[in-house]
Every structure is written in C-alpha cells, then in structure tokens.
Amino acid sequence: MHLPHTNITPLPPYERLFGPVTQARIVRLFALYLVLLGAGTGFLFLAQQDSLRIFGMGLILPGGGFLAHADICTQNGIGHLLAALAGTAAFGMSLLVWFGTGNILAPPLTWLGLAIGAAAMRHGALRPSTIGMVYAGLAVALVALAIAMSAWFALACRQRRIDNAYLAGQTGQTALIFDAGSDAGHAAEMSLDHLQRLRFALDRALQPLDQFNGFEKIDQFQTAATRYQLNFLAYGVALTQARFTPAFRGYMHAAQIALLDKQTQHQVWSYWALENLWGNLQADPDPVARENIMYTGFVALQMALFSASTGRRDFSEAGRFTLAHPSGTRYAHDALSLVRRLEHEYTASPYYLIACEPNWVYPLCNTIGASAIMAFDAQHREQRWATHAKDFRHNLEAEFLDGFGRYIPCKSARTGLALPAIGGVMPLAMPCFFLNAVAPDLARRQWLLLRRQLFDHLGAFRRRAFWPIDTGNYGFSRASAYSATALAAAELGDSAVYRTCIEALETECPSVLKDGVIHRRKASVWAHGVELMARAGARDGFRQLIEAPPSVAGPQLDGVVYPDILVASAHADGDGLRAVLYADGVHTIGLTGLQAHAPYLANDIAITADAGGAAHFKLPLAGRTSLHVRPQGGG
C-alpha cells in the first residue's frame, strides 16, 4: 500500500546546534581538553627544565612542542616550524586511522608521542615569544570556531525555513514525482539481460564455501570489505527471488544460503579481533558479542531477506550461524541471537543507534539493523521493534539531522564529533531505501530534499553531484553512486531518477558480456550488488517484503542445473505454477510442493508426483520457453 500524497513530514525546528546527547559528549570532550590545557600550562610555567616546558607546549597543541624554537629567519627555526607542521599532519593522519579502523588509541598516542619527541630535542632555552604565540593562536582558533558555529547556526535556521517551505510546496507534486506503479500481483519476469547480470552474483555465491574468486580483496575495515560484498550481493539475490522467482527453489535458495555461510568464514570476520582490541580495549574476537552493527545488523538483514523471499527458516535453527575461530573456540549464533543482540545494543546506546567501527555511529547502518528486526517481527508474528521505534526515530531526528536537513554520514559516539557530509548524493540517497521500511514519511521527505541536487534549474541531470569514487573499491567511477541512487529511486517510485541514473551508469561504465555474464569493468563488486538490488526493485518493494513477506506454497521449480537453465520467472498459479526458462536442448526439470501421487500436466507432458510431492520430467527448451504446470484436469 502506498503512502497518501497529501502530507509531507516537515523538518523539525532547528533550535540548537547539537542534540542533547551530542552536546553532552562535546562538553565532556572540551572539559577533557581543558584538563590537558591546564596540565600543559602547569608544565610550561612551573617546570624548571626546558624539556618539561616544551613537553607542556606539546600537550597544549598536537605538535606544539616543535614551535618552541620555530622562526622564519634561521635555518634551525624553519626546521622546527616544518617539524610542527609535520606533527600536525601526523595527528591528522591519526584521526583518519581512528575513523577508518576504529583505532581510538591512534590520536592520543600520536599527540603524546609528538609531545615527547619535541621534548627530547636539545636546542637550548625556550623562547618567551613562542609561548605568547601559542596562546594567541589558541585564542584566535577558539574565537574563529565560535564565529563559525554562530554563522552556521544562523544559516542553518534560515535554510531550515526554506526547506520546510519547499516541502510544503511539493505536496501537490508528489504524485508526479513518485509516479511508478506497483507490480503487486503481476507475474514479473526478468529479461535475458537481467538474468546475465544476476549471474554475476550467482557465480560468486555458488563456488565452494572457502573460495572467494571474483571478490575484491582490498581491506577489511572500510567499505571495500568482503562482508559488504557478500551482504549486498545477497540482498540483490533475495530481492530478485521475491519479485521474479518466488516459486523457484534450486540455485536461488542455494546462492542465498551460500552467501550467508561465507559470512562465517574466519577471513570475513577476523577484522573484529583488531578493531575490538584497539577500539574497545577488549580481546573478544566474536563480532556479535558487542556493538558492531556493521556485521550483526547487516547479516541479520541478510537472514531476514532470505527467509522473507523463500519462506525458509534455516537460520532460525539454534546455532545455525556458528563462527569457528582458528583457536578452536566456536561462537554459536542464529537469527534470534542476532536480533536480540541488536535490541540490547539499541537500548544500551545513549544515542539509541549502534556503533559500527568501535565508536562510530552511522544512521545508514542502523536503518539496516532496524529493517532486520522489523522483518523478524513480521515473519515470527512478534512486536519487538514496536518497543524501539519511537525512541529510534526521535534520536535519529534529534542527534543525526544536521542544520541543513541532511542525515550526517557518521558520528563519534564518545566525542559527539561528526564527519562532514562528503561523498556527494549517495550517502544521502541510500538511507532513503532502508528508511522506507523504518519510517516511510522520513524517507520521502529526505528524498524530496535530495532530489533538488540531482537536476539544475533547466532540468538537466547534474552528474557532478555524484561522487567520482566507487565506495566498493575506492576506484575512480561513479558506479556505486549511480547504483545506490537508482536503488532508492526504485523503492520510492521515482521513475525519472531511476531511469536517468541507470542511463548514466551505462554511459560511464558500459556493460560487458563475457561467457554469458554481464559485468562493468570499472564497477566494484559492491556496486554490482547494489545495481542488482535496484534492478529487482519496485515501488515499496523492499518495505512490503519486510512488513508482509509473501507466503510460499504450492508447486515450485527445484531441480534445474545452473547455469544450463536460467529461470526468468516462477510464480504460483492457483494449484499450479507458471515459469519462464532460458536454455536450449532437452533438460530435466524438477518440481516440489505437488500433491502426493497426484497427476499434473507440465505444458503437454503428463507427470505424477511421488509420495513426497516431487516430480522430474524432460522438457525441450529453445531459448525463452514458457512452462505451465497445473493439476491434470484443471484449467
């Protein structure tokens, strides 16, 4: 069911720079710096040794100790100035390491190391003039920060009013923007082109469990990690299964199971031992044991979509998802244990959102975890998410919506500091896809605000709004940006943006057909997975699969050999089934879910089910071939 087009939820009033939790964290961080400033000042003015005084300057500013003998008139002074600049750069790199790997020890240890390094240098007495320069520079920085924050607040308040006026003016336009129809009740069919794109995911899924041929191996800490490639290929297969082949078991079920089982391989989750150690100062290598939504939440949704698209509950069996550590320790998990962990972490977090890399909280990741719990509820007739939905929504709006109406990419849970909105439109577009299940009104609001950036005042598509770096492999390509934006557009029903993004993707990263498989040379595996999701998308398709998974009953295709036979569609047809297959020659077709010992017609071929409701028969295929299985004597 579509949302009514009469009302658009406005942005909340912008009355403060930070949400209450964020503000408390920033105040705590500032207080901690004041302690450091006090300690540095104490060393600087009370210590008798120059090395201790220089150490004090190093505590006041990262790399500040090198300024003790800096000037622009002497070779020695210029060398110290360059050392100070290099120290500042090193501290900046430590912040990037902290963000990229969750290593919370990197910034303080770098700061302390720079202070000790400067203090260990022997270059004579501290120059009194440099002390005044350090404090003057600090004062100027604080004043500049205060002015910048005041200006930001004023501009944001103004922009918030403009945005809400814009949203109010869009009320009558939403039917034109969200114009895609739903194919509910329609027996959707994949084209051969679509099937060849699906094979990109299937070929990687259906290889031996311990093999990862065709996956990209760059790093395991950021967005190129193997786990994300597995997640989004699996999401793509699940959405394809639900829309096009709900009455087909066979290789589609096998692929989803394999992609989940690959997540249990130690090479996929071994990253957590390091991240937990240097981010939480804990030695537990189990990636599910504490806040780690980038694994727990993403895998939980993978399980949920598998169950929703197949009707199977394999991973609801206790211990079905067991992680075996090389030491011999086994961590037994399953769908319920992952959902319970998510619930616990949501309520334990002051933000009511869970961290990914230790300390960093991403709204996108949390909408994925929330979707997993909602899907689990629908499949098991429970109401777990109902107890979290209100607090989750409140904190999402209060703590993660910036002054310009954008959800921030991520925020440090311990310091309250947030990354700027970098990455073009993709990090703003992709959350809309998952938000459409969690809070559909917020998804539509954020999409309408974002949509203004996609076209100029003449209506021309603004490709420069899309980041030219592929999130999945850090290469120079807009593949992931176009795919992710097309994905959100498909879910929300914005057919114009969907078509434009897919056309731009094809223009900049052309499709290549090789050995029956379509791929894009410049696109990451992750981008291929997201594109598969987009191509399997339909208006509110993800939301409907989460909220009301279809029942899977009646005859089903089962025993077909991949890739000899490609199944373009398979849908229930009363007591029968209709399917479309691509192959040439005579092939054996398997069926399950039939009435025991009952006679059926498969096209014009008479078959009889065995005691288990299964049957096999030979079928001549010539390219695209329709198959209709029905009870003998039926319509």
Image (cartoon, rainbow, N blue to C red):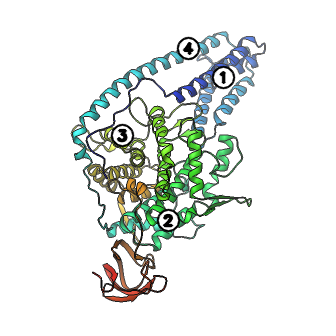
Image quarter in which the C terminus is found: bottom left
Q: CA distance from mark 3 to mark 1?
A: 47 Å
Residue assigned mark 2: 256
Q: Give, as a three-letter code, the residue at label 3.
A: Gln
Disc 2 residue crowd, few under 14, some 14–19, many 20+, Cα 10 Å: many
Distance, label 2 to label 1, CA atoms, is 57 Å
Residue at 59% x, 28% y is 88
Query: Going 43% across and 86% down the picture, which residue do you hit?
Result: 609
Q: Which residue does the numbered mark 1 point to in the structure image? A: 66
Tag 2–tag 1 contact (CB < 8 Å): no
Q: Give the residue number, with chain letter if any, for mark 3.
A: 446
Instruction: Give me the disc on residue 139.
Output: 4
Amino acid of disc 4: Ala
Q: Considering depth in this image, is 375 or 353 the residue closer to the camera?
A: 375
Residue 42 visible within the image: yes
Amino acid, disc 2: Gln
Q: Are marks 3 and 2 in contact (CB under 8 Å)?
A: no
Please state which of residues 89 and 22 is positioned toward the viewer in this rendering: 22
Question: Label 1's element?
Answer: helix
